[in-house]
Amino acid sequence: MTSIRILIIAPNWIGDAVAAQPLFMRLATRRPNVVIDALAPPWVAPALAAMPEIRKVIANPFGHGAFRPLARWRFARGLKDQYDEAYVLPNSWKSALIPFFAGIPIRAGFIGEGRYGILNRARALDKKAQPLQVERYAVLAEAPQFPLERPLPNPRLQRESAEVQASLDALGLPATPRPIVFCPGAEFGPAKRWPAAHYAALARELAELGHPVWILGSKKDMPVSSEIAQLAGSAVRDLCGRTSLAQAIDLIALARCVVTNDSGLMHVAAALGTPLVAIFGSSSPNYTPPLSPQAQIMWLQLECSPCFKRECPLGHLNCLRQITPESVLAQLRPMLE
Protein backbone atom coordinates (compact mmCIF):
# COMPACT_ATOMS: atom_id res chain seq x y z
CA MET A 1 0.00 0.00 0.00
CA THR A 2 1.38 3.39 -0.99
CA SER A 3 1.99 5.71 1.95
CA ILE A 4 0.28 9.08 2.23
CA ARG A 5 3.04 11.57 2.96
CA ILE A 6 2.10 14.56 5.12
CA LEU A 7 4.15 17.62 6.02
CA ILE A 8 3.18 19.60 9.12
CA ILE A 9 4.18 23.27 9.25
CA ALA A 10 4.56 23.35 13.02
CA PRO A 11 3.72 26.19 15.42
CA ASN A 12 6.46 28.45 16.75
CA TRP A 13 5.77 27.78 20.44
CA ILE A 14 6.34 24.65 22.51
CA GLY A 15 2.89 24.59 24.08
CA ASP A 16 1.20 25.02 20.71
CA ALA A 17 3.31 22.21 19.25
CA VAL A 18 2.16 19.87 22.05
CA ALA A 19 -1.44 21.00 21.53
CA ALA A 20 -1.18 19.99 17.87
CA GLN A 21 -0.46 16.33 18.66
CA PRO A 22 -4.14 15.24 18.73
CA LEU A 23 -4.31 16.36 15.09
CA PHE A 24 -1.38 14.07 14.27
CA MET A 25 -2.98 11.25 16.25
CA ARG A 26 -6.20 11.61 14.32
CA LEU A 27 -4.44 11.68 10.96
CA ALA A 28 -2.45 8.56 11.90
CA THR A 29 -5.48 6.68 13.23
CA ARG A 30 -7.69 7.35 10.25
CA ARG A 31 -5.04 6.43 7.69
CA PRO A 32 -2.67 3.75 9.00
CA ASN A 33 -0.48 4.10 5.91
CA VAL A 34 0.28 7.75 6.64
CA VAL A 35 3.81 9.12 7.14
CA ILE A 36 4.02 12.44 8.99
CA ASP A 37 7.01 14.78 9.03
CA ALA A 38 7.16 18.20 10.68
CA LEU A 39 8.89 21.40 9.60
CA ALA A 40 9.63 23.17 12.87
CA PRO A 41 11.84 25.82 14.49
CA PRO A 42 14.82 24.29 16.33
CA TRP A 43 13.50 25.37 19.74
CA VAL A 44 10.27 23.39 19.17
CA ALA A 45 11.74 20.33 17.44
CA PRO A 46 12.46 18.18 20.56
CA ALA A 47 8.80 18.26 21.59
CA LEU A 48 7.74 17.03 18.16
CA ALA A 49 10.50 14.41 18.13
CA ALA A 50 8.97 12.92 21.31
CA MET A 51 5.70 12.22 19.46
CA PRO A 52 5.43 8.68 18.03
CA GLU A 53 3.29 9.96 15.15
CA ILE A 54 6.14 12.10 13.77
CA ARG A 55 8.64 10.23 11.59
CA LYS A 56 11.19 13.06 11.42
CA VAL A 57 11.52 16.75 12.16
CA ILE A 58 12.96 19.05 9.52
CA ALA A 59 14.61 22.20 10.85
CA ASN A 60 12.83 25.34 9.66
CA PRO A 61 15.63 27.79 8.77
CA PHE A 62 13.35 30.84 8.76
CA GLY A 63 13.12 32.63 12.08
CA HIS A 64 9.88 33.98 13.47
CA GLY A 65 8.89 36.94 11.32
CA ALA A 66 11.56 36.42 8.63
CA PHE A 67 10.23 36.64 5.07
CA ARG A 68 13.16 35.96 2.66
CA PRO A 69 10.96 34.91 -0.30
CA LEU A 70 13.77 33.70 -2.59
CA ALA A 71 15.31 31.59 0.18
CA ARG A 72 11.88 30.16 0.99
CA TRP A 73 11.33 29.26 -2.66
CA ARG A 74 14.72 27.52 -2.89
CA PHE A 75 14.12 25.61 0.34
CA ALA A 76 10.64 24.60 -0.79
CA ARG A 77 11.87 23.29 -4.13
CA GLY A 78 14.01 20.84 -2.20
CA LEU A 79 10.76 19.36 -0.82
CA LYS A 80 9.09 19.04 -4.23
CA ASP A 81 7.40 15.67 -4.91
CA GLN A 82 8.08 14.47 -1.35
CA TYR A 83 4.62 15.10 0.17
CA ASP A 84 0.98 14.61 -0.77
CA GLU A 85 -0.57 16.87 1.87
CA ALA A 86 0.50 19.75 4.09
CA TYR A 87 -1.13 21.13 7.24
CA VAL A 88 -0.18 24.73 7.98
CA LEU A 89 -0.73 25.39 11.69
CA PRO A 90 0.56 28.97 12.11
CA ASN A 91 -1.87 31.60 10.87
CA SER A 92 0.61 33.78 9.00
CA TRP A 93 0.75 34.16 5.23
CA LYS A 94 4.50 33.44 5.22
CA SER A 95 4.06 30.04 6.89
CA ALA A 96 1.88 28.83 4.00
CA LEU A 97 4.41 29.70 1.30
CA ILE A 98 6.72 26.68 1.63
CA PRO A 99 4.05 24.02 0.87
CA PHE A 100 2.77 26.27 -1.93
CA PHE A 101 6.21 26.70 -3.46
CA ALA A 102 6.87 22.97 -3.02
CA GLY A 103 3.77 22.15 -5.07
CA ILE A 104 2.23 19.94 -2.38
CA PRO A 105 -1.17 18.98 -3.86
CA ILE A 106 -3.34 19.43 -0.73
CA ARG A 107 -2.55 22.40 1.53
CA ALA A 108 -4.82 22.67 4.56
CA GLY A 109 -5.08 25.42 7.15
CA PHE A 110 -7.21 28.27 8.42
CA ILE A 111 -8.35 31.22 6.36
CA GLY A 112 -6.36 34.33 7.21
CA GLU A 113 -3.80 36.89 6.07
CA GLY A 114 -4.72 36.59 2.39
CA ARG A 115 -4.04 32.85 2.17
CA TYR A 116 -6.74 32.17 -0.44
CA GLY A 117 -5.14 30.21 -3.26
CA ILE A 118 -1.99 29.52 -1.26
CA LEU A 119 -4.10 27.11 0.78
CA ASN A 120 -6.52 25.01 -1.26
CA ARG A 121 -8.30 23.35 1.69
CA ALA A 122 -8.91 26.37 3.85
CA ARG A 123 -11.25 26.38 6.81
CA ALA A 124 -12.77 29.27 8.76
CA LEU A 125 -11.86 29.18 12.45
CA ASP A 126 -14.95 28.92 14.67
CA LYS A 127 -13.72 29.86 18.14
CA LYS A 128 -17.06 29.15 19.79
CA ALA A 129 -17.33 25.67 18.31
CA GLN A 130 -13.67 24.93 19.15
CA PRO A 131 -12.87 26.78 22.40
CA LEU A 132 -9.72 24.77 23.18
CA GLN A 133 -6.43 25.19 21.35
CA VAL A 134 -6.18 21.43 20.76
CA GLU A 135 -9.59 21.45 19.11
CA ARG A 136 -8.64 24.28 16.78
CA TYR A 137 -5.75 22.25 15.42
CA ALA A 138 -7.55 18.89 15.37
CA VAL A 139 -10.49 20.19 13.36
CA LEU A 140 -8.12 20.51 10.40
CA ALA A 141 -8.29 16.72 10.11
CA GLU A 142 -11.92 17.13 9.05
CA ALA A 143 -13.08 18.28 5.63
CA PRO A 144 -14.04 21.98 5.79
CA GLN A 145 -17.78 21.24 5.77
CA PHE A 146 -17.64 18.79 8.70
CA PRO A 147 -17.48 19.53 12.45
CA LEU A 148 -14.84 18.24 14.82
CA GLU A 149 -15.33 14.65 15.91
CA ARG A 150 -15.10 14.32 19.69
CA PRO A 151 -13.69 13.14 22.05
CA LEU A 152 -10.10 13.97 21.28
CA PRO A 153 -7.14 12.05 22.69
CA ASN A 154 -4.83 13.94 25.03
CA PRO A 155 -1.28 14.76 23.87
CA ARG A 156 1.18 12.05 24.87
CA LEU A 157 4.93 12.47 24.62
CA GLN A 158 7.25 9.46 24.95
CA ARG A 159 10.74 9.26 26.41
CA GLU A 160 12.78 6.10 26.92
CA SER A 161 14.54 5.40 30.23
CA ALA A 162 17.89 5.30 28.41
CA GLU A 163 17.29 8.81 27.07
CA VAL A 164 16.44 10.07 30.55
CA GLN A 165 19.56 8.48 32.01
CA ALA A 166 21.72 9.98 29.26
CA SER A 167 20.44 13.45 30.15
CA LEU A 168 21.09 12.85 33.85
CA ASP A 169 24.64 11.72 33.07
CA ALA A 170 25.30 14.69 30.79
CA LEU A 171 24.11 17.13 33.47
CA GLY A 172 25.73 15.30 36.41
CA LEU A 173 22.39 14.76 38.17
CA PRO A 174 21.26 11.85 40.36
CA ALA A 175 18.30 9.68 39.37
CA THR A 176 17.15 9.37 42.98
CA PRO A 177 15.44 10.72 44.89
CA ARG A 178 13.17 11.85 42.11
CA PRO A 179 12.91 15.64 42.11
CA ILE A 180 10.03 18.04 42.25
CA VAL A 181 10.44 20.30 39.23
CA PHE A 182 9.57 24.00 39.20
CA CYS A 183 8.88 25.70 35.85
CA PRO A 184 8.63 29.37 36.86
CA GLY A 185 8.97 30.93 33.41
CA ALA A 186 6.29 32.09 31.01
CA GLU A 187 7.29 33.43 27.61
CA PHE A 188 4.27 35.71 27.30
CA GLY A 189 5.09 37.93 30.28
CA PRO A 190 5.08 38.47 34.06
CA ALA A 191 1.28 38.39 34.36
CA LYS A 192 1.52 34.60 33.88
CA ARG A 193 4.30 34.08 36.45
CA TRP A 194 3.58 33.02 40.02
CA PRO A 195 5.79 35.26 42.22
CA ALA A 196 9.39 34.18 42.78
CA ALA A 197 8.95 34.63 46.54
CA HIS A 198 6.07 32.14 46.50
CA TYR A 199 8.15 29.58 44.58
CA ALA A 200 10.99 30.07 47.06
CA ALA A 201 8.71 29.64 50.09
CA LEU A 202 7.28 26.45 48.59
CA ALA A 203 10.80 25.15 47.89
CA ARG A 204 11.80 25.67 51.53
CA GLU A 205 8.70 23.77 52.70
CA LEU A 206 9.48 20.90 50.33
CA ALA A 207 13.12 20.80 51.39
CA GLU A 208 12.04 20.44 55.02
CA LEU A 209 9.98 17.44 53.94
CA GLY A 210 13.07 15.95 52.31
CA HIS A 211 12.22 16.58 48.65
CA PRO A 212 14.82 17.90 46.17
CA VAL A 213 13.61 20.78 43.98
CA TRP A 214 15.01 21.45 40.50
CA ILE A 215 14.21 24.59 38.49
CA LEU A 216 13.90 24.24 34.72
CA GLY A 217 13.53 26.82 31.99
CA SER A 218 15.27 28.57 29.13
CA LYS A 219 17.95 31.24 29.31
CA LYS A 220 15.17 33.85 29.19
CA ASP A 221 13.88 32.48 32.50
CA MET A 222 17.22 32.80 34.30
CA PRO A 223 16.44 36.14 36.03
CA VAL A 224 13.36 34.56 37.62
CA SER A 225 15.13 31.32 38.54
CA SER A 226 18.07 33.25 40.01
CA GLU A 227 15.71 35.22 42.22
CA ILE A 228 14.07 32.02 43.43
CA ALA A 229 17.46 30.43 44.10
CA GLN A 230 18.65 33.48 46.01
CA LEU A 231 15.54 33.45 48.20
CA ALA A 232 15.41 29.67 48.67
CA GLY A 233 19.14 29.02 49.13
CA SER A 234 20.09 25.36 49.28
CA ALA A 235 16.47 24.27 48.93
CA VAL A 236 16.70 24.39 45.11
CA ARG A 237 19.00 23.35 42.29
CA ASP A 238 18.79 25.96 39.54
CA LEU A 239 19.09 24.33 36.11
CA CYS A 240 17.55 27.20 34.14
CA GLY A 241 19.48 27.83 30.94
CA ARG A 242 21.69 24.77 31.53
CA THR A 243 19.58 22.20 29.70
CA SER A 244 18.41 21.75 26.15
CA LEU A 245 14.67 21.32 25.61
CA ALA A 246 15.23 17.59 25.03
CA GLN A 247 17.02 17.34 28.39
CA ALA A 248 14.29 19.35 30.10
CA ILE A 249 11.71 16.92 28.70
CA ASP A 250 13.73 14.03 30.11
CA LEU A 251 13.97 15.62 33.56
CA ILE A 252 10.24 16.35 33.61
CA ALA A 253 9.59 12.72 32.65
CA LEU A 254 11.71 11.68 35.66
CA ALA A 255 10.11 14.14 38.09
CA ARG A 256 7.86 13.07 40.90
CA CYS A 257 5.68 16.09 40.19
CA VAL A 258 5.84 19.56 38.64
CA VAL A 259 4.78 23.03 39.78
CA THR A 260 4.39 25.29 36.79
CA ASN A 261 2.92 28.45 35.35
CA ASP A 262 0.81 28.35 32.21
CA SER A 263 3.73 27.73 29.85
CA GLY A 264 5.12 25.40 27.23
CA LEU A 265 6.71 23.21 29.89
CA MET A 266 3.31 22.88 31.58
CA HIS A 267 2.00 21.23 28.41
CA VAL A 268 5.11 19.06 28.20
CA ALA A 269 4.59 17.84 31.78
CA ALA A 270 0.92 17.07 31.11
CA ALA A 271 1.74 15.19 27.90
CA LEU A 272 4.38 13.12 29.73
CA GLY A 273 1.81 12.09 32.34
CA THR A 274 3.85 13.63 35.17
CA PRO A 275 1.65 14.81 38.07
CA LEU A 276 1.54 18.60 38.13
CA VAL A 277 0.05 21.69 39.70
CA ALA A 278 -0.64 24.33 37.04
CA ILE A 279 -0.99 27.92 38.25
CA PHE A 280 -3.06 30.30 36.12
CA GLY A 281 -3.28 34.07 36.43
CA SER A 282 -3.86 36.33 33.44
CA SER A 283 -4.63 33.41 31.11
CA SER A 284 -7.43 30.87 31.18
CA PRO A 285 -7.52 27.08 31.57
CA ASN A 286 -10.69 27.22 29.50
CA TYR A 287 -8.46 27.76 26.45
CA THR A 288 -5.11 26.10 27.16
CA PRO A 289 -5.53 23.67 30.08
CA PRO A 290 -2.98 20.99 30.91
CA LEU A 291 -4.61 17.96 29.30
CA SER A 292 -3.90 15.22 31.80
CA PRO A 293 -5.84 13.43 34.55
CA GLN A 294 -2.68 13.93 36.63
CA ALA A 295 -3.01 17.74 36.52
CA GLN A 296 -4.43 20.00 39.22
CA ILE A 297 -5.32 23.54 38.14
CA MET A 298 -5.14 26.50 40.50
CA TRP A 299 -7.01 29.55 39.20
CA LEU A 300 -8.79 32.10 41.38
CA GLN A 301 -11.10 33.41 38.63
CA LEU A 302 -11.04 36.94 40.00
CA GLU A 303 -13.27 39.55 38.37
CA CYS A 304 -10.25 40.96 36.54
CA SER A 305 -9.05 37.64 35.10
CA PRO A 306 -8.44 36.37 32.58
CA CYS A 307 -7.19 39.64 31.14
CA PHE A 308 -4.67 38.02 28.76
CA LYS A 309 -2.24 40.90 29.35
CA ARG A 310 1.55 40.61 29.54
CA GLU A 311 1.60 42.72 32.71
CA CYS A 312 -1.12 43.24 35.31
CA PRO A 313 -3.08 46.31 34.10
CA LEU A 314 -4.15 47.01 37.70
CA GLY A 315 -0.66 46.72 39.14
CA HIS A 316 -1.48 44.24 41.93
CA LEU A 317 -1.20 40.77 40.31
CA ASN A 318 -3.71 39.46 42.83
CA CYS A 319 -4.71 36.61 40.53
CA LEU A 320 -1.31 35.06 41.28
CA ARG A 321 -0.21 36.61 44.57
CA GLN A 322 -3.32 35.34 46.35
CA ILE A 323 -2.48 31.74 45.42
CA THR A 324 -0.38 30.97 48.48
CA PRO A 325 2.54 28.54 48.77
CA GLU A 326 0.54 26.71 51.45
CA SER A 327 -2.37 26.15 49.07
CA VAL A 328 -0.06 24.79 46.37
CA LEU A 329 1.62 22.49 48.91
CA ALA A 330 -1.81 21.16 49.85
CA GLN A 331 -2.35 20.19 46.21
CA LEU A 332 1.08 18.56 46.07
CA ARG A 333 0.76 16.40 49.16
CA PRO A 334 -1.38 13.63 47.55
CA MET A 335 1.12 13.49 44.67
CA LEU A 336 4.03 13.14 47.10
CA GLU A 337 2.31 10.29 48.92
Image (tube, rainbow, N blue to C red):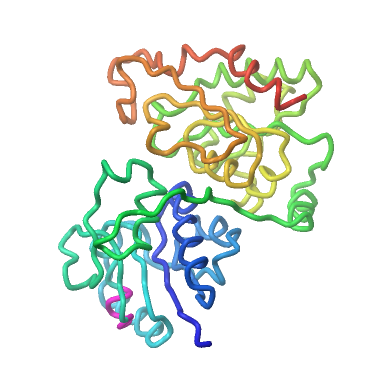
Residue, x 37% and y 86% (percent of image)? 80
190 or 323, nearer to the observer: 323
Residue 254 vertical position relative to residue 161 in the rendered view, above or below: above
- Residue 126, given in percent of the width and then of the height, sits at 24, 48
Residue 302 vertical position relative to residue 36 in the rendered view, above or below: above
Residue, x 76% and y 28% (percent of image)? 212
- Residue 232, given in percent of the width and then of the height, sits at 66, 19
- Residue 13, given in percent of the width and then of the height, sits at 43, 50
Q: Is residue 141 toward the left or the right of residue 159 in the image?
A: left
- Residue 194, given in percent of the width and then of the height, sits at 49, 23
**Residue 196 lies in the magenta stretch:** no
**Residue 103 lies in the magenta stretch:** yes
Residue, x 71% and y 29% (percent of image)? 213
Q: Quadrant of the C terminus?
A: top right
Magenta part of the chain:
98-104
Residue, x 33% and y 25% (percent of image)? 306
Please identify the quarter of the rendering in which residue 54 is found: bottom right
Q: How many marks?
A: 0
